[in-house]
Amino acid sequence: MNNYKLTIQYDGTRYSGWQKQGNTADTIQGKIETVLQKWLKEDIEIHGSGRTDAGVHALCQVANFKTSAALSCPQIMTALNQYLPQDVRITSVTQVDPRFHARLNAKQKHYRYQIDNGSAAEVFERKYMTRFADTDYFYKLCRQTGHLSATFGDSSVNTDISRPSERNNVASNNTMPPQRNNVASNNTMPPQIIYDLEAMQKAAALLCGEHDFKSFCDNKRMKKSTVRTITNLTIRNENNKMILDFYGNGFLYHMVRILTGTLLEVGIGLKSPEDIPAILQAQKREAAGFTAPPQGLFLMNVTY
């Protein structure tokens, strides 16, 4: 059997994630497998380096598949890009050792989370960054902790600032509620969140290394080890954008998004860097912060 390695870029906005689970038409894996099976006239299974969630993007997802057909790499790349949707692109094809497996042989993954923190939303990047100033729950937390650059004059905004699990209209699993749609006409300027970058960086340093990240996993039925190693975690501001880069040997279900939510809560003073060891030790999901939305997350690279 011939084994081929693919590198893939995709805009995850309209997909139900990487892995097919009865929704083949709406997953990246399903799209690629369908094209290959129709073309090669044989059953094809693609193995990805990891399972990105619905709405998450990839600049460099890696996958492999095996086929009895002897094909040239340019031939595969041309065929796939001809029939795949425009928001899924194959950027390279390489024939590899039959034993190569995109997930099992991965040594390190790099994820990036992007946050729009400008005074006005970026129209053309809204699908690729998260704007927390427009999110009802996080806005209220920022107002509570004094981390807004401007105060809204809209008296119709509910001032309930309790934790998500304590509110009737928010799911108890620390996920973000819908975005706020209306701003009162007497607001002189939109809000801009003021993050304590130094505190976030201190918290990030405490998350680096080998730890049991069970508190940062949304899969309560996880039976395998939840121990992972974060080799580097950097946070920086760049042109009204906050960028969080995560490097590690593997990530649990929703782990990067929960880490992001926790670091943001540190950034607005709801948590402190000193809370991180206790959160790790608790090994309970509710000890960590909220799950950040998917659209700001990218799989940037996979190292072998």
Image (cartoon, helix red, strand yellow):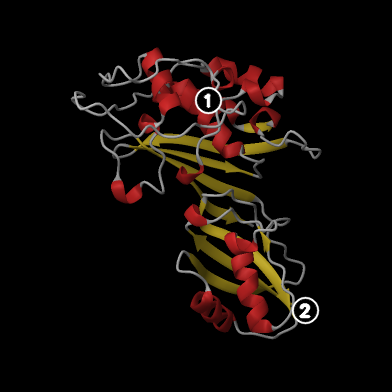
Give percent across and percent down for residue 292. Answer: 51, 35
Give percent across and percent down for residue 241. Answer: 34, 38
Determine whether the residue tagged by mark 2 lies in a helix, strand or loop: loop
Q: Residues within 10 Å of mark 2 (few under 14, many from 20)?
A: few
Give percent across and percent down for residue 251. Answer: 64, 42
User: Residue at the right extreme?
Assistant: 223
Q: Which mark is residue 169?
A: 1
- Name the residue located 45 percent from the left edge and 68 percent from the top edge: 86
Q: Is residue 21 above or below residue 73?
A: above
Give percent across and percent down for residue 271. Answer: 51, 17
Determine whether the residue tagged by mark 1 lies in a helix, strand or loop: loop
Q: Is residue 58 visible?
A: no
- Name the residue located 41 percent from the left edge and 31 percent from the top edge: 135
What amino acid is at disc 1?
Asn
Q: Is residue 109 above or below residue 283?
A: below
Q: Residues within 10 Å of mark 1 (few under 14, many from 20)?
A: few
Please identify the quadrant where the N terminus is shown. Answer: bottom right
- Name the residue located 59 percent from the left edge and 53 percent from the top edge: 17
* Res. 143 image quadrant: top left
Please identify the quadrant where the C terminus is shown. Answer: bottom right
Give the mark count. 2
Q: From the image, tell me which residue sits under label 2.
A: 1
Q: Earlier in the sequence, mark 2 or mark 1?
A: 2
Q: Which mark is residue 254?
A: none
Q: Are marks 2 and 1 in contact (CB under 8 Å)?
A: no
Q: Spatial distance from mark 2 to mark 1, Cα to Cα?
A: 53 Å
Q: Is residue 216 visible?
A: yes
What amino acid is at disc 2?
Met
